[in-house]
């Protein structure tokens, strides 16, 4: 029987560390993670170009006969949510997953939203949360720290102090990161925002995936799974700082230091 993979679609690699959790929870499943082999950042593109790229990458996943699609990019949800409405396989998106959980468990509480500057401006979370107070903090500098592998360093604590110093005396009930990778800086966050809960997106997404797989009655329990990465070659060094799994690489035929082939198991 053919083992249909689970597809994960992203922009850049701000959520690539979700794979660490998923290969642990679903060790028999195959995963295809696709950011983009041509562009490493959609936020600089016009809307029509974003939609064209997502359409291309979505077609690739469907050609691979994925049984489930997980959209982990806020930008893709912002511009392309309608594109997933008519897909025959189940689709989970990060924005609705977070919003529904927060409104069910922290309604009218004090919330701290960690999101990129563009996502804060897009208002895709704020307009849907039911909150008492909502504080918005740009996570762009935190993303850079994580992709450099500089967590728990003087640099990371300096950045955290700069971002959160205005909140040290504020009451915050829940910290809401909108990138999975951001959880990698939880030590720094808790240094300055104390006595708050932290939303672990990887836990939330894993539970949603399990529920979806049970619905389609298609959870594998044998045969070691593999992970296929489809990412821009320029992100090579960065992704190694946030994932610790064996995988297959796919991309442009370009040799990089330490990699002999783009389809070689590490």
Image: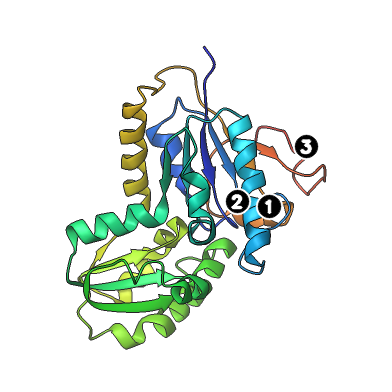
Contact, mark 1 vs mark 2 (Cβ under 8 Å): yes
At 75% from the left and 38% from the top, the residue drawn is: 262
Q: Position of residue 53 (x, y in %)?
A: 66, 52
Nearer-the-camera pick, 7 or 55 = 55
Q: Is residue 159 left or right of residue 174?
A: right
Q: Position of residue 76 (x, y in %)?
A: 53, 57
Asked whether residue 41 appears in the rendered view, the answer is no
Question: Callout 3: few (<14), some (14-19), or many (20+) C-alpha neighbours within 10 Å?
Answer: some
At 18% from the left and 65% from the top, the residue drawn is: 107
120 is higher (above) or lower (below) than 3: below
Which residue was labeled with disc 3?
261
Label 3 vs 1, first from the N-terminus: 1
User: Residue 62 shows which numbered tag?
Assistant: none
Q: Position of residue 11 (x, y in %)?
A: 58, 56
Label 3 vs 2, first from the N-terminus: 2
Quadrant showing the C terminus: top right
């Amino acid at each position: 029987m053919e083992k249909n993979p689970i597809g994960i679609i992203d922009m850049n690699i701000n959520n690539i560390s979700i794979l660490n959790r998923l290969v642990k929870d679903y060790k028999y499943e195959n995963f295809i993670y696709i950011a983009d082999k041509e562009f490493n950042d959609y936020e600089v593109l016009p809307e029509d170009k974003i939609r064209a790229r997502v359409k291309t990458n979505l077609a690739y996943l469907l050609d691979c006969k994925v049984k489930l699609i997980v959209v982990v990019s806020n930008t893709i949800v912002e511009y392309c949510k309608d594109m997933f409405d008519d897909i025959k396989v189940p689709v989970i998106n990060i924005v609705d997953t977070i919003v529904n959980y927060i409104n069910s468990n922290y309604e009218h509480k004090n919330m701290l939203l960690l999101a990129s500057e563009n996502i804060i401006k897009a208002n895709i979370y704020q307009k849907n949360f039911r909150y008492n107070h909502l504080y918005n903090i740009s996570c762009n500098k935190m993303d850079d720290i994580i992709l450099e592998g500089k967590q728990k360093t003087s640099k990371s604590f300096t950045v955290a102090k700069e971002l959160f110093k205005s909140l040290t005396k504020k009451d915050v009930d829940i910290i809401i990161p909108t990138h999975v990778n951001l959880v990698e800086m939880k030590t720094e966050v808790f240094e300055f925002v104390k006595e708050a809960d932290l939303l672990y997106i990887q836990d939330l997404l894993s539970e949603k995936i399990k529920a979806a797989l049970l619905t389609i009655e298609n959870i594998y329990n044998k045969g070691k799974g593999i992970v296929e990465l489809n990412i821009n070659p320029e992100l090579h060094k960065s992704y190694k700082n946030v994932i610790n799994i064996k995988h297959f690489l796919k991309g442009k035929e370009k040799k990089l230091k330490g990699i002999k082939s783009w389809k070689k198991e590490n």
